[in-house]
Structure formats: structure tokens, C-alpha cells
Image (cartoon, grey):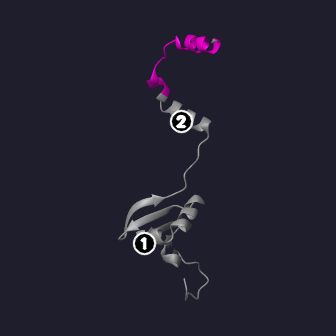
Amino acid sequence: MKGRTDSKPSRIDVSHGCVTIKGMKKASIRDLHMRTGALVQEAADGEVIIIEKRGVAVAELRQVKKKTAGEAFRELERQGYFKRLGKTNSQIDRFISEDRDR
């Protein structure tokens, strides 16, 4: 903060109109409107930003966690997705083979 004379770091950072308290960043809807690109970049870099409307938290802006195809498959498997599908018609293999032979 401007004007601080002690060497202790501030817990509250009010630069750019956003507030950071103990690692959690908050921004108003106006801040989001005015600084969308910068806030999105901060979220992409791993920061979690709470968007507030009139002081009430209404949304979070955070990094999207990318999954590999294998991770996505294993997660679906853990959730029982493939068990719910049930067995397929065993004739599908024959149809595929016949189609290849054409």
C-alpha cells in the first residue's frame, strides 16, 4: 500500500481496483469489465479470482484443468459410466468386418 512505512508486507493489495486478501483475489464486476484480459491471464496463471457484485461473491474465475484422454477415460470408468452402458450387440464386430471386406 502507498504510504506504509514499516517493512511488514501488507495483507491487502488494492492496486488496479482489485483486492487481494491472503492469496485470494477479489474483483468487482466493474473491474472485470475494465480489466477482463488481465484478470483472465491471472486466472490462466493459476490465480483464483472471486467476482463480486455489490460486495457479494457471485462467481469464480479460475484456470481450467486440462485432462489427457487417458485421465478422462479413467475418470469416466471410476464413475461407472461404462457399466451403465451395458453390453453391446455382439454382431457389431461382424458388421464392421463385412464393411471392411467390401
In the image, what residue occupies the spot 63% across and 15% down?
100
Element at label 2:
helix
What kind of element bears circle 1?
A: helix
Q: Residue at x 64, y 11 (%)?
A: 101
N-terminal-most mark, 1 or 2: 1
Task: Farthest residue to the front: give it.
Answer: 102
In the rendered structure, which amino acid carries the disc numbered 1? Arg
Kind of residue at badge 2: Glu
Residues in magenta, as a range:
82-101
Q: Decide if residue 18 is in sight here.
A: yes
Between the C-alphas of marks 1 and 2, the distance is: 38 Å
Image coordinates of residue 15 in percent, x first then y, are 53, 78
Tag 1 near tag 2, CB within 8 Å:
no
Indicate the position of residue 29 as horizontal and vertical percent values. Answer: 41, 68
Question: Residue 6 appears in which quarter of the rendering?
Answer: bottom right
Please state which of residues 40 and 51 is positioned toward the viewer in this rendering: 40
Q: Does the magenta run of residues contain 86?
A: yes
From the image, tell me which residue sits under label 2.
75
Within-10-Å neighbours for mark 2: few <14, some 14–19, many 20+: few
Q: Which residue is mark 1?
A: 30
Mark nearest the camera among 1 and 2 is 1
Tally the numbered discs: 2
Q: Is residue 80 magenta?
A: no
Taking the spot 42% from the left edge, 72% from the top edge, the residue there is: 30
